[in-house]
Amino acid sequence: MNKKTILLLTFLLGSVTMYAQNVGSSPEYIKALTADWKGERLPDGRPKVSDAILERLKNISIEEAWGVLRNRGYQNQYESDWQIIHPDEPMTGRVVTAQYMPLRPDLEKYIKAQGKSEGRAQQGGTNSWPIDVLVDGDVYVADSYGKIIDGTLIGDNLGNSIYAKSKRGVIFYGSVRDQEGLSEIKGFNGWIKGQDPSFIQQMSLVSINVPIRVGRAVVLPGDVVLAKKYGVIFIPAHLVEDLVITSEVTALRDEFGHQRLREGKYKPGQIDSQWSEEIRKDFMNWLNNYPGKLPMTKQELDNYFKERNW
């Protein structure tokens, strides 16, 4: 083999590597997608929103979270009309995304070959691949284009694996099988569009940790999800802390306002409009003498009021 042939082969191999589309996104790509996040990151590049914030987020109402996002210009983050395995158990977590499509043989062949080159499991279906990347605190979110019959992404075996890795559950724009078995996994929860006893077929996983669409919502890897019986909201990681403290203060303002209205101290118009200086001082005094435990620290509360007007 002469020198020119060797150089040509090297160039061709390099070109194939350069233009190969990975099944799983690189950390660099995820960091670029979530560039507004300035905090700690997971090894795969996703933002690592703190466990404490995830726990506080459970107490935020869907309406409050939606209002904050809407005011920040994020109008396409909510989806409703779910079947929920345990409706009274809210779930929060860091999102891992997966995109499914109807099966096309030549694309499926490429996906499996590329998955092999990325070290992904070769036994079983590709629908196990997103589960393999989950870590504690993750929520597996998939767009399987609403397919119900023959579109079941998991049963109770994979459900047990998901919970073992993430201590969370799933949000599928699609379906599951063996919902009865899934409901018996303690701590596991799921928001799905349907369930069916059939096995998955004529579907293909095409990518992990890419932007996906879940109904009317746009979802990025590393988003934080708030899932409740009233719907699901996907929150950009860089907005989560601000959303939590803003929503917590809004809830406290509502609690104060409702109490004062019951007491007859103020008229509804006074509470529903911009507050007077008298009401502001009354509210701050009420906060300082709050009978229970405030959801935020005193420092967080002070910082919030420094940066905002009434």
Image (cartoon, helix red, strand yellow):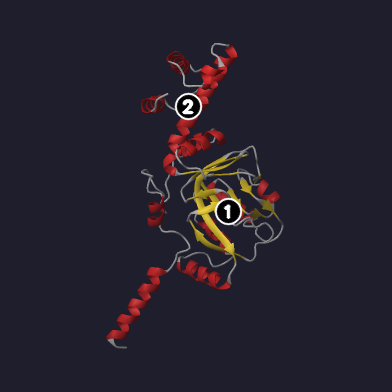
Q: Which mark is residue 161?
A: 1
Q: Determine if residue 136 is in view.
A: no
Left/right placement of residue 234 relative to residue 27 reads right
**Element assignment for label 1:** helix
The tag on residue 249 is 2
- Furthest toward the left, the residue is 3
Does residue 235 lie above or below 28 as drawn? above
Which is more toward the observer, 70 or 42? 70
Question: Label for residue 236?
Answer: none
- Residue positioned 45% across, 44% down in the render: 236
What amino acid does circle 2 point to? Val
Looking at the figure, which quarter contains the N terminus?
A: bottom left
- The residue at 64%/47% (across/down) is 185
| Residue at x-position 68% and y-position 55% | 177
Compare residues 72 and 83 and report the one nearer the observer: 72
On the image, the x and y values in percent for residue 80 come to 61, 44
Q: Is residue 20 left or right of residue 140?
A: left
Mark 1 neighbour class, 10 Å CA radius: few under 14, some 14 to 19, many 20 or more: some
Which quadrant of the view contains residue 196?
bottom right
Considering the numbered disc 2 on the image, is that residue within a helix, a strand or a loop?
A: helix
